[in-house]
Amino acid sequence: MNAEKKEKVLLIISTTRKSPKSIERAIEYARGKNAELVCLYVLDLELPKAIVKQMTEEGWLGGKPSEDFYLALLKEYEHWGKEKIEEIKKEAEKHQIPFRAEIRRGDFLNQALDFINQEQVNYIIVTRRRRSNLSRFLFGSAVAELKKQVSVPVEIIDE
């Protein structure tokens, strides 16, 4: 006898994508579908690199302090991710929603696509940062690219 497989709802958060609205929506959607909620936190390595680069160029950092500061930022962002995952887990438990989470380091788009392919999710909820249309046009959008590359519905919550 083949039991019906439970749907998986994926909530993707990161150092810059963490809207409370997206978390509420993921809980609401998973509850409505009686689905498992899977949370992926992507610790995007480019953000702390950009911060350190800017501070070094401005003369605030250099040499060993730059490396130490970069590692401290990574540690802080990972700590933040664990705290956010714990908050989401508690909310999921309150509504009796099965919950799992994973933290990955690297490029947001690549890590998200890899995880989606590995997990075979049915629905994705992700936050899009507020940016101008010109900025999206010039620099692209990881969320728009994600939506193009996956075959499951993607709900985008604007911050």
Image: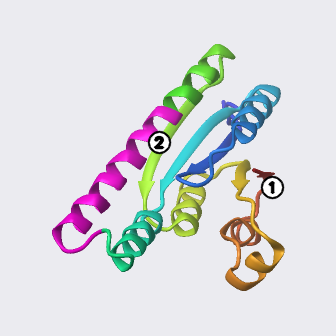
Q: Name the amino acid type tagged 2.
A: Gly
Q: How is the image coloured?
A: rainbow
In the rendered image, the vertical position of residue 40 relative to residue 34, given as above or below: below
Quarter placement of the N terminus: top right
Question: Which mark lies nearer to you, 2 or 1?
Answer: 2
Q: Position of residue 37 (x, y in %)?
A: 64, 35
Give me the residue at 62% from left, 45% from top.
18
Q: In the rendered image, is residue 116 in sight?
A: yes
From the image, give the main secondary structure of the stretch colored magenta: helix
In the rendered image, the vertical position of residue 93 relative to residue 134, given as above or below: above
Total marks in image:
2
How crowded is the residue under tag 2: few (<14 C-alpha within 10 Å), some, or many (20+)?
many
How crowded is the residue under tag 1: few (<14 C-alpha within 10 Å), some, or many (20+)?
few
Of residue 60 and residue 13, the one placed in the foreground of this image is 60
The answer to which quarter of the image holds residue 136 is bottom right
65 left or right of 93 in image: left
Give me the residue at 62% from left, 52% from top.
17
Q: Position of residue 55 (x, y in %)?
A: 38, 70
Q: Where does label 2 land, which residue?
A: 81
Does 34 appear in magenta?
A: no
The answer to which quarter of the image holds residue 145 is bottom right
Q: Name the amino acid type tagged 1.
A: Pro
Task: Tell me where the magenta segment starts and ends, as one range.
Answer: 61-84
In the rendered image, the vertical position of residue 9 relative to residue 53, given as above or below: above
Q: Earlier in the sequence, mark 2 or mark 1?
A: 2
Q: Where does label 1 land, which residue?
A: 153
Q: Secondary structure at mark 1?
A: loop
Does 65 appear in magenta?
A: yes
Q: Secondary structure at mark 2?
A: helix
